[in-house]
């Protein structure tokens, strides 16, 4: 078994996760990255997407995470996210509707700042849908 390390996920509303894990994968601004025990320290912005981690029992878990920051230190790794949801917490119909609204806003060709917000909304909706679909075994 690989070396374990403490990992926490905090949102403004709750402590989403706190336990020992073997590894994690998350999407940063420059792409997907993995973190194992004894990883070099860094802090980086996190993009909306899928958080995957291997827990202390060796099972892979996944969740949706919104934007935030990942801090990797020698003694602990902490993810601060605007939102985090387990697959069973995701309302598929609501996420699908949010995706549709974001696509309509993008198609409107509105002002640049509105387009950037619509792109971010679309990424969050698509990530939620992907987490929900993957958890249902619909690869």
Image (spheres, helix red, strand yellow):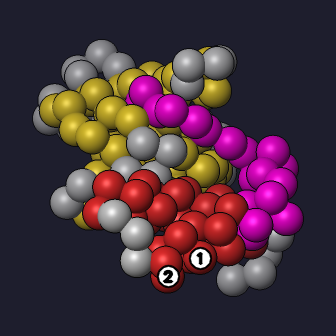
Q: Can residue 53 be seen in the rendering of this structure?
A: no
Marks 1 and 2 close (CB-CB < 8 Å): yes
Q: Which residue is mark 1?
A: 104
Q: Is residue 98 magenta?
A: no
Quarter of the figure with the C terminus: bottom right
Q: Secondary structure at mark 1?
A: helix
Mark 2 surroundings within 10 Å by alpha-carbon count, few (fewer than 14), some (14 through 19), many (20 or more): few
Across and down, in percent, residue 135 comes to 76, 64
State whether residue 41 appears in this view: yes
* Residue 107 - label: 2
Horizontal side of residue 13 vs 121, given as left or right? right
Residue under the image location 76 percent in, 67 percent down: 97
Residue 59 disc label: none
Q: Position of residue 68 (x, y in %)?
A: 39, 36
- Residue at position x 42%, y 30% from top? 79
Determine the image quadrant of residue 41. top left
Residues shaded magenta: 79-97
Q: Secondary structure at mark 2?
A: helix
Rendered position, 72 above or below 114: above
Counting from the top left corner in percent of width and height, residue 101 is at 65, 68
Q: Residue 80 at what x, y percent from top left?
A: 43, 27
**Side (left or right) of 1 relative to 63:** left
Which residue appears at 61% of the width and 27% of the height?
17
**Relative horizontal placement of residue 137, taking residue 26 as reference (left or right):** right
Q: Quadrant of residue 23?
A: top left
């Amino acid at each position: 078994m690989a070396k374990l390390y403490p990992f926490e996920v905090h949102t403004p509303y709750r402590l989403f996760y706190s336990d020992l894990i073997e590894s994690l994968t998350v999407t940063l601004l420059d792409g997907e990255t993995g973190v194992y025990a004894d990883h070099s320290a860094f802090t980086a912005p996190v993009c909306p997407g899928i958080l995957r981690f291997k827990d202390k029992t060796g099972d892979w878990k996944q969740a949706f995470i919104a934007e935030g920051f990942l801090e990797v230190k020698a003694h602990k790794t902490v993810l601060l996210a605007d939102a985090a949801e387990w697959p069973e917490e995701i309302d598929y119909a609501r996420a699908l509707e949010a995706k549709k609204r974001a696509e309509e806003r993008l198609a409107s060709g509105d002002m640049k700042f509105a387009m950037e917000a619509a792109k971010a909304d679309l990424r969050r909706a698509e990530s939620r849908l992907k987490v929900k679909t993957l958890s249902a075994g619909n690869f």
